[in-house]
Image (cartoon, rainbow, N blue to C red):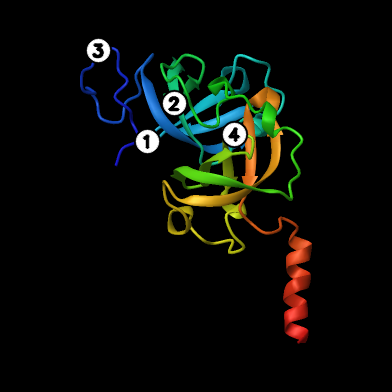
């Protein structure tokens, strides 16, 4: 299916199939991350450039602190060059909340400084190609939404998120980090994120 969202000002159908319209909103995915920005696939066979200045209202130093590959984003087309290349922005869209977007404004204060070894209750809210978004609830009742990246769902590196978890599923997670300025919580469902320990365990098993 097409990733193009029905975010057109005139509400009409696209006149030319595959054409990008100035000012229209599209739903796409991050397919490449560079030092100066990212490329967004909006499902029209062409990629839009999302410059780092168009990601957030705050200054973006490192693009990879704000975006991950495969992340779904809502963007608007802000410029189109004669050769067909175009630029997009996350700042001028109507969407109020995007899970990985610092403008979502969730309070991650209660999650800052938690031990990465402690387990907490969570519920899967959204499953995407690059992992799962989980609502975490702490013992004191504080809650927030965090991302369990694909390689932190389980010890099998090739498992697909949709094959491992489903929306509404109760899970146990560890809080790896909480970045206050980004309103972002990084989670893990693995027993250990130290691959060295995993490898040693495998070797011990072979010896026995």
Mark 4 and mark 3: Cα distance apart in space? 45 Å
Mark 3 and mark 2: Cα distance apart in space? 18 Å
> Looking at the figure, which quarter contains the N terminus?
top left
Using the image, determine if residue 88 lies above or below residue 63: above
- Residue that mark 1 sits on: 43
Residue 110 screen position, x and y as percent: 68, 30
- Residue that mark 4 sits on: 141
Residue 26 screen position, x and y as percent: 38, 26
Tags 3 and 2 touching, CB below 8 Å? no
- The quadrant in which residue 105 appears is top right
Q: Element at badge 1?
A: loop
Give the residue drawn at x 46%, y 45%: 128
3 or 2: mark nearer the eye: 2
Name the N-terminal-most of marks 1 and 4.
Answer: 1
Task: Specify the label residue 10 is tagged with.
Answer: 3
Name the N-terminal-most of marks 3 and 2.
Answer: 3
């Amino acid at each position: 299916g097409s990733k193009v969202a029905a975010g057109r000002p005139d509400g009409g159908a696209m006149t030319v199939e595959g054409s990008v319209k100035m000012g229209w909103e599209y739903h796409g995915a991050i397919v490449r991350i560079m030092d100066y920005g990212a490329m967004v696939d909006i499902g029209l066979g062409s990629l839009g450039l999302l410059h780092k200045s168009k990601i957030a209202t705050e200054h973006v130093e490192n693009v990879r602190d704000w975006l991950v590959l495969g992340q779904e984003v809502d963007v608007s087309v802000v410029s189109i060059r004669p050769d067909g290349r175009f630029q997009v922005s996350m700042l001028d869209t109507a969407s109020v909340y995007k899970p990985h977007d610092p403008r979502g404004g969730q309070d991650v204060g209660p999650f800052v400084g938690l031990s990465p070894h402690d387990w907490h209750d969570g519920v899967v809210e959204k499953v995407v190609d690059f992992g799962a978004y989980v609502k975490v609830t702490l013992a004191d009742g504080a809650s927030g939404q965090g991302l369990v990246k694909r390689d932190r769902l389980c010890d099998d590196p090739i498992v697909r998120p949709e094959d491992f978890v489903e929306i509404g599923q109760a899970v146990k997670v560890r809080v790896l980090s909480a970045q206050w300025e980004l309103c972002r919580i990084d989670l893990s469902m693995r027993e250990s994120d130290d691959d060295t320990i995993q490898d040693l365990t495998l070797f011990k098993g072979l010896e026995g």
